[in-house]
Amino acid sequence: ASPNVAPTGSHGSLDLGMEADTGGAGGSAASDAAPRQPKTVRHPTIDAPASDEEAEHFMRMYSPRSFCSTPAPLRRRHLSSATEIPEELQWRQFLTLKGPPLLLVAVLLPLCMRTFGLEPQARCALIMVGVLTLSLFEVMPLFCVALFIPVMGSVSAVFGEARTMMTTSTILLGSFFNQTSFLVLGSLVINAVFAKCGILDLLTSTLLRRWKLQSKSFLLVIMLCTMAACSVLCSGSIVVLAALKPLMRQGLEESCIKRLLLGVAFAANAGSVLLPISSTTTLITLSLLRDFDHRLSLWSWIFVSGPVALLSTIICWWSLVNLFPAEEDVDEEVLRSVEEGFEESERPQLLRQWSMSHASELVMTDGHWIMLCLTCLAVLGMTVFAETLEPILGHPAIVALAVVVIAFGSGFMSRDEFLTLEWDLLAIVGGTNVMALMVRETALAAHASVLLTQSTFFEYLPFWPLLVLVISFLLPFGTFCGHSLTAVLILPLLVPLGATGK
């Protein structure tokens, strides 16, 4: 049986009833004899499904995993099919809006570099300006811009005329994939394993049995759980939003939906810096620090990131609760179980919440438990015990690559699931690796450090005001240009600048 929701009064209250298909003639006659009264308020009831097929349909309708089970390319194709632009119009738009920036960056800029014989540092700086131009004008997606970085470096002869074009292109292409790329790949597979095991669905079901969906407590707990999930998963916010999407269709207030969405977004940003493997930006930072012989232990990282992430999440929760208040914020209380509210409330929200809390239950097989335990051990090996396992396994990327082999080699995950991984993140990491190599080989950071130390303004500027200036620049840049572009452009310059100018 499937729930039918219909308006029952002038104030838009909802009546949730269950209609069986096998009611027979008696049920039809009874319904004719006693017509529905639109103003009658009844307590919501729920009946058992009449067959296994109806129960399976009910689970598919209300399970948060119903959205996650669709491969990402199919979801994108379904979402973009309604807004497709004719091919002729696409070409015209590309030539008029995107053609001039692309011509400037891909043709005129390399031509000027090689014609006027610029120094390698100037060529590297102009390439960074070109990447920024392509991103700001949205000429192509960011992963395509990242793939275009080695092309620009080779065409521009970024290392100078002393090296041949074959040598330059070989060096740039050889640095595209490194240990950080395999760490990102392992993190994506760990994300997929957790999603397939339904960990976040189980967490959501547990929270729904404890707190009301529109309560402040539910918002705080879901934000803290999102922060913890995004500290391990590269795309944890996508999984959390996919689990919450069916819940937001249950007649919630607009303010509750807004603060849930914004709360997940803010908590995901806070959790993405909690651990070194939390995001591509943190992985790129650690990789660049290793290139300059600067190593950070896990505990020194958490000692700074932990309080910052936790306080940021709590402050965001407090701000969202005050900016988007709900009607039940005043008399909120924690329920021992959601079923307690059935006798206290005449609205069907609690019934639908009870249905949601039981619809997302997943039967874990032995394969699920084994793969989940191996994945958790891999996370510990990549973070907590990375230095301990270094004499035995070497770089933590070996552990990440082992997770990929076990997940797909054992048959736990299929080839189709392998194709739905976020390969654009690997392209962005590869472009960042090439940019970092160009900054290091051309000595652009060292040259900028010398210019800064010789400046009278920076010579007498203490460390903390300098840090405030750097953060004041990075905040608007990361806001308007995105975290990924900041990692591609700024980190390869900022990390060596700090290492050489300390």
Image: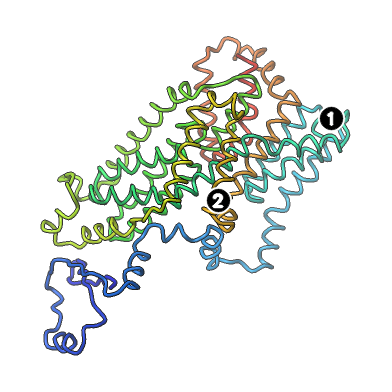
List the residue tagged with mark 1.
Answer: 160
- Label whose residue precedes the other's in the sequence (2 or 1): 1
The residue sitting at 17% across, 66% down in the picture is 44
Q: Out of 370 and 230, give the one closest to the viewer.
A: 370
Give residue 246's quadrant in the image: bottom left
Foreground label between 2 and 1: 2
In the picture as drawn, the residue positioned furthest to the front comes out as 366
- Marks 2 and 1 sit apart, C-alpha to C-alpha, by 49 Å
Q: Quick one: 278 or 129, which is closer to the camera? A: 278
Q: Is residue 12 above or below residue 419?
A: below
User: Which residue: 54% across, 48% down?
Assistant: 407
Left or right, 166 with respect to 266, comes to right
Per the image, label 1 sits on a secondary structure element best described as: loop
Q: x, y percentage for residue 233?
A: 48, 42
* Residue density around tag 2, few if under 14, some if 14–19, many if 20 or more, within 10 Å: few
Left or right: where does residue 28 sit relative to residue 110?
A: left
- Residue under label 2, please give it: 410
Instruction: Where is residue 138? Give x, y as percent.
Output: 63, 49
- Name the residue rendered at 66%, 24% in the picture: 291
Please name whichever residue, 216 or 243, is drawn nearer the observer in this view of the structure: 243
Specify the farthest residue to the top.
Answer: 460
> Where does the image place residue 402, in percent across and percent down from the top left?
58, 40
- Quarter of the rendering occupied by the C terminus: top right
Amino acid bearing label 1: Gly
Give percent across and percent down for residue 265.
Answer: 42, 44
Residue lying at 57% horizontally and 38% vertically, measured from the top left: 400
**For residue 175, which quarter of the picture?**
top right
Disc 1: CA contacts within 10 A as few (<14), some (14-19) or many (>=20):
some
Helix, strand or loop at label 2? It is loop
Q: Which amino acid type is shown beneath numbered disc 2?
A: Ser
Toward the viewer: 406 or 251? 406
Numbered disc total:
2
